[in-house]
Amino acid sequence: MSEKVAEEVVSEATESAATETSSSEAKKELDPVAALTEDLQRLQAEYSNYKKRVDRDRALAGEYATSTVLTEFLPILDDLDRALEHGELTGGFKAIADQILNATKKLGLEKFGETPSSFDPNIHEALMHDTSSEVKETTVTKILQPGYKYRERILRPARVVVTDPEHGS
């Protein structure tokens, strides 16, 4: 009987070892699958981030190119404004000037600079300075050359005359 018990113990040990081997092989099979899955997820995330970065860079490059072209148009727009003020734009020239102004506006170019308004050194360039008892804070009293911005970017600050309040002696 002891031989029979010994055989049963050996056979159980063999079956147990075989079961453990098959379960450890299954775990090894799952581990490579999990590792490959993690690698795939990481690569997908890297590609997604790369694509977002490229799209953002492409949009910034487009905005920069547009702002560069619009900056080159600023002297032309100044000449058109002066011609309009002096009544020299009539007929076909007026139609062309209107088309240029509409095209630059459609691209996102905005003209700014109003009087009277509070002086802001971020958007105004003071070329002349005066004092007056009529103002209570530093005020833009005359626009010498309008400012232009494209989206939130200042292409040219408004060139202005600034008036400060008089200080009592």
Image: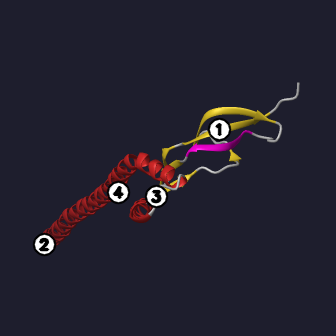
Which of the pair 161/59 is nearer the observer?
A: 161
Residue 100, horizontal then vertical, whole percent: 40, 60
Inter-mark Cα distance, 4 to 2: 71 Å
Q: Which residue is mark 1?
A: 161
- Neighbor class of circle 2 (other Cα within 10 Å; few <14, some 14-19, many 20+) is few
Q: Which residue is mark 3?
A: 89
Query: Mark 4 = which residue?
Result: 59
- Residue at x-position 37% and y-position 54%: 63
Range shown magenta: 138-145
**Could you tell me how far apart the alpha carbons at marks 4 and 1 are, in whole angstroms?**
37 Å
Q: Are marks 3 and 4 in contact (CB under 8 Å)?
A: no
Depth order, front residue of 110/58: 110
Residues under labels 1 and 3: Cα distance? 27 Å
Callout 1, which amino acid?
Answer: Val
| Whether residue 135 can be seen here | yes
- Looking at the image, tell me whether mark 4 or mark 1 is earlier in sequence order: 4
Position of 78 compared to 117: left or right?
left
- Decide if residue 123 is in sight here: no
- Residue at 64% x, 33% y: name it: 128
SS under mark 1: strand
Q: What's the distance in space between the residues labelled 3 and 4, CA to CA?
A: 37 Å
Q: What is the three-letter code of the residue carrying label 4?
A: Ala
Seen from the viewer's position, the closer of residues 167 and 86 is: 86
Looking at the rendered structure, the secondary structure element under dot 4 is helix
Please state which amino acid type lies under the numbered disc 2. Answer: Ser
Q: Are marks 1 and 2 in contact (CB under 8 Å)?
A: no
Q: Is residue 127 above or below residue 67?
A: above
Magenta highlight on residue 140: yes
Asked if residue 139 lies in the magenta stretch, the reply is yes
Q: Amino acid at mark 3?
A: Leu
